[in-house]
Image (tube, rainbow, N blue to C red):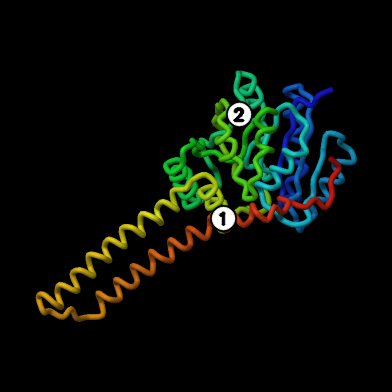
């Protein structure tokens, strides 16, 4: 018998949440009355997350798990779950319970209205700082403005996709994964539901500002060439300004017989030019780094233990 629904949840040091997560996921699957599997991906946890998962899996045949040899990242964990999944429809959900498992029922019904992807859009984000909310909102709006694809704003990875979308997603070999962007790039029919994101009840968030920055860079470099164009345009403009300044200095000295004095103007010019150059080199470096990661063709993750 085919599995109707696969649920994939990445976990990093979530031992306090595993039991509640599994029980709530199982309950909602039983409510919608479908055959299901729950795949928990341990992304290199240093606490007892894996031990708790293994204990539950011995009693619950629907629970499958994947344990990485180290922390390979949230997106790699989701991708591993998709690769191991067998369901006709796949739910992606965070394992910290901020995305309420009960919303899966709404996603499930919506996918059968002729949609290939249904994402969950956050109406309210409880327990998050104003800085985190504002930077996230700014990032998605910026990304939409500089890319040719439309990536839904105010959303995370919490969504349902059908098997056709999953199969196409698995063909994408990008090493630096940005799944919500890749799903949007595929162009399948989308819809959404709105929900209230809960605050974290137990444990601490593992997605700090450093990871957010790396995630944002992956999203921008993976789906937009605008930063490279910006570097090129900046170089052209600075070159034009520099040419005008050179002409002015030569005219002042040899035609008007004036000597331009003062180190302030020199320092401002040098620092401005240096800043533009370093910014451009940094932008190019990010793209080269991405190319380098893909060329090496290393595996996206290493599995230490699994029952899939």
**Nearer to the camera, 147 or 93:** 147
Above or below for 234 versus 169: below
Image coordinates for residue 123, horizontal then vertical, percent: 51, 35
Residue toward you, 158 or 3? 3
Check the image and name the residue furthest to the top: 113
Residues packed near mark 2 inside 10 Å, few (<14), some (14 to 19) or many (20 plus)? many
Q: Secondary structure at mark 2?
A: strand
- The picture quadrant where one finds residue 60 is top right
* Image disc number at residue 99: none
Q: Which residue is mark 1?
A: 214
Which one is in front, 291 or 105? 291
As drawn, 85 above or below 96:
above
In the orientation shown, which residue stands out farthest toward the front?
254
Residue at 18% x, 78% y: name it: 260
Cα separation, mark 1 vs mark 2, equals 26 Å
Q: Residue at x 38, y 64 (%)?
A: 276
* Side of 243 where 184 appears, left or right: right
Q: Residue at image x 23%, y 70%?
A: 246
Q: Residue beneath label 2, please?
A: 117
Determine the secondary structure under disc 1: helix
């Amino acid at each position: 018998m085919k599995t109707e629904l696969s649920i994939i949840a990445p976990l990093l040091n979530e031992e306090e949440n595993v039991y509640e997560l599994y029980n709530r996921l199982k309950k909602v699957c039983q409510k919608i009355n479908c055959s299901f599997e729950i795949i928990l991906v341990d992304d290199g946890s240093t606490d007892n997350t894996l031990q708790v998962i293994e204990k539950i899996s011995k009693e619950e045949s629907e629970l499958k798990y994947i344990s990485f040899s180290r922390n390979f990242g949230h997106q790699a964990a989701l991708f591993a779950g998709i690769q191991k999944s067998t369901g006709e429809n796949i739910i992606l959900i965070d394992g910290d319970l901020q995305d309420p498992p009960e919303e899966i029922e709404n996603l499930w019904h919506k996918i059968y209205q002729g949609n290939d992807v249904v994402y969950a859009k956050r109406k309210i984000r409880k327990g998050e700082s104003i800085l985190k909310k504002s930077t996230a909102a700014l990032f998605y709006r910026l990304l939409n403005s500089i890319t040719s694809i439309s990536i839904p704003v105010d959303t995370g990875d919490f969504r349902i996709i059908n098997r056709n979308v999953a199969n196409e997603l698995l063909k994408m070999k990008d090493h630096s994964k940005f799944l919500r962007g890749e799903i949007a790039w595929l162009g399948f029919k989308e819809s959404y539901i709105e929900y209230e994101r809960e605050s974290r009840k137990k444990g601490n968030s593992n997605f700090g500002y450093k990871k957010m920055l790396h995630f944002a860079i992956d999203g921008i470099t993976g789906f937009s060439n605008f930063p490279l164009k910006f570097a090129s345009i900046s170089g052209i403009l600075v070159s034009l300004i520099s040419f005008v300044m050179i002409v002015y200095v030569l005219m002042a000295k040899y035609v008007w017989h004036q000597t331009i004095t003062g180190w302030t103007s020199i320092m401002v010019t040098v620092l401005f030019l240096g800043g533009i150059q370093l910014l451009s080199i940094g932008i190019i470096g990010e793209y080269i780094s991405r190319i380098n990661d893909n060329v090496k063709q290393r595996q996206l993750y290493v599995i230490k233990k699994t029952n899939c």
